[in-house]
């Protein structure tokens, strides 16, 4: 990935988050923009988001983005100066929820994260 793509990814992530949490504050309180992945030609971008809540909250977020994606793109275009502003595709990323589920399972098993590391080779001890 080029440096330009990385910079555009971070810029779009910041500006989309700002638009969502200033213009659509009540509808997006449970939505977090995790990452943006711009295509190499900078014409399209996938915006990965996470939702705090249950299945109905995730459906509401998907409906919100289906209705408001063009408005979000319009507001972002006011502050981001690019030759072509990428077409935004909003994609739910369930990795945050999976991580929370794994942590809950580890808590149930009594894992506290303090594994004693002992090297197998006695010569490596200090």
Image (cartoon, rainbow, N blue to C red):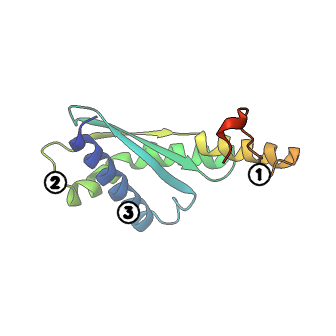
| Residue corresponding to mark 1 | 114
Position in image of residue 64 (x %, y %) = 49, 49
* Quadrant assignment, res 44: top left
The front one of 66 and 14 is 14
User: Which quadrant would the N terminus be assigned to in this image?
Assistant: top left
Q: Residue at x 23, y 35 (%)?
A: 43
- Give the mark nearer the N terminus: 1 vs 3: 3
- Gap in angstroms between the C-alphas marked 1 and 3: 38 Å
Between disc 2 and disc 1, the foreground one is 1
Q: Residues within 10 Å of mark 1 (few under 14, many from 20)?
A: few
Q: Which secondary structure lies at badge 2?
A: loop
* Quadrant assignment, res 30: bottom right
Q: Which residue occupies the extreme right position in the image?
A: 109
Left or right, residue 29 beside residue 76: right
- Are circles 2 and 1 on residues that touch, CB within 8 Å? no
Position in image of residue 99 (x %, y %) = 66, 43
Name the mark on residue 18: 3
Left or right, residue 75 beside residue 33: left
- Gap in angstroms between the C-alphas marked 2 and 1: 48 Å
Q: Which secondary structure lies at badge 3?
A: helix
Q: Residue at x 58, y 50 (%)?
A: 51
Asked if 25 appears above or below 44 in the picture, the reply is below
- Give the mark nearer the N terminus: 2 vs 1: 2
Asked if 13 appears above or below 23 in the picture, the reply is above
The front one of 124 and 75 is 124
- Gap in angstroms between the C-alphas marked 2 and 3: 16 Å
- Give the mark nearer the N terminus: 2 vs 3: 3
Q: Residues within 10 Å of mark 2 (few under 14, many from 20)?
A: few
Name the mark on residue 81: 2
Position in image of residue 23 (x %, y %) = 39, 65
């Amino acid at each position: 990935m080029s440096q330009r793509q990385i910079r555009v990814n971070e810029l779009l992530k910041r500006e989309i988050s700002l638009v969502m949490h200033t213009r659509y504050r009540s509808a997006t309180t449970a939505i977090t923009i995790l990452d943006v992945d711009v295509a190499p030609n900078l014409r399209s971008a996938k915006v990965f988001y996470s939702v705090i809540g249950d299945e109905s909250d995730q459906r509401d977020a998907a409906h919100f983005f289906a209705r408001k994606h063009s408005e979000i793109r319009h507001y972002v275009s006011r502050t981001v100066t690019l030759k072509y502003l990428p077409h935004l595709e909003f994609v739910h990323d369930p990795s945050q929820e999976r991580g929370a589920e794994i942590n809950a399972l580890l808590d149930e098993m009594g894992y506290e994260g303090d594994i004693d590391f002992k090297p197998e080779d006695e010569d490596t001890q200090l």
